[in-house]
Amino acid sequence: MSKPSSARYADMPLHYGHVPVWLAQRMSLLGGAVVESIILEYGHSAVLSRLSDPFWFQAFGSVLGMDWHSSGVTTSVMGALKRAINP
């Protein structure tokens, strides 16, 4: 009889391709608005604090329109924010 493993992992598929242009534009607009709101309410450090929280970041990516289990959340969200901040 085998002993059950105590290791835990998440099975997240690797996605290929690009975010559609229409979604990337919407992600930039919404992401920029959210970041601006956080800065106005809580300050610049609050944005960095939130972006460094993996649970908040994953939820933020979902709000912006990415699949919650997509392998491209990090690059897509950060790319959208980069375009919003430096158009």
Image: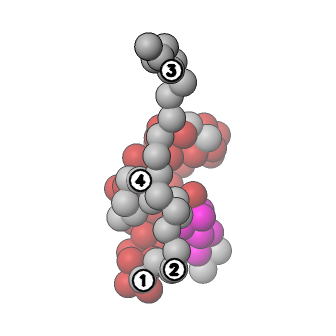
The quadrant where residue 22 appears: bottom left
Residues at marks 2 and 1, CA–CA distance in whole angstroms: 9 Å
**What percent of the width, then of the height, locates residue 68?**
38, 53
Q: In this view, does 86 lie above or below 44?
A: below
Q: Residue at x 50, y 28 (%)?
A: 8
**What percent of the width, then of the height, locates residue 5?**
50, 20
Dot 2: within a 10 Å radius of its alpha carbon, few (fewer than 14), some, or many (20 or more) residues? Answer: few
**What percent of the width, then of the height, locates residue 1?**
44, 13
Dot 1: within a 10 Å radius of its alpha carbon, few (fewer than 14), some, or many (20 or more) residues? Answer: few
Say which label, 2 or 4, has the lower sequence index. 2
Which residue was labeled with disc 2? 17
The one nearer the camera, 78 or 10, is: 10
The C terminus lies in quadrant = bottom right
**Amino acid at circle 4:** His
Q: Residue 5: which numbered mark, if any?
A: 3
The one nearer the camera, 68 or 40, is: 68
Q: Which residue is drawn at 52% across and 74% down?
A: 16
Say which label, 2 or 3, has the lower sequence index. 3
Residues at marks 4 and 1, CA–CA distance in whole angstroms: 17 Å
Mark 4 against mark 3, which lies toward the viewer? 3
The answer to if 68 sits in the magenta stretch is: no
Magenta-colored span = 75-83
**Amino acid at circle 1:** Pro
Q: Residue 84: which numbered mark, if any?
A: none
The one nearer the camera, 10 or 30, is: 10
Residues at marks 1 and 3, CA–CA distance in whole angstroms: 40 Å
**Amino acid at circle 2:** Gly
Mark 1 against mark 3, which lies toward the viewer? 3
Residue 4 relative to residue 65: left or right: right
Tell which residue pokes out farthest to the bottom in this image.
21
Which residue was labeled with disc 4? 69
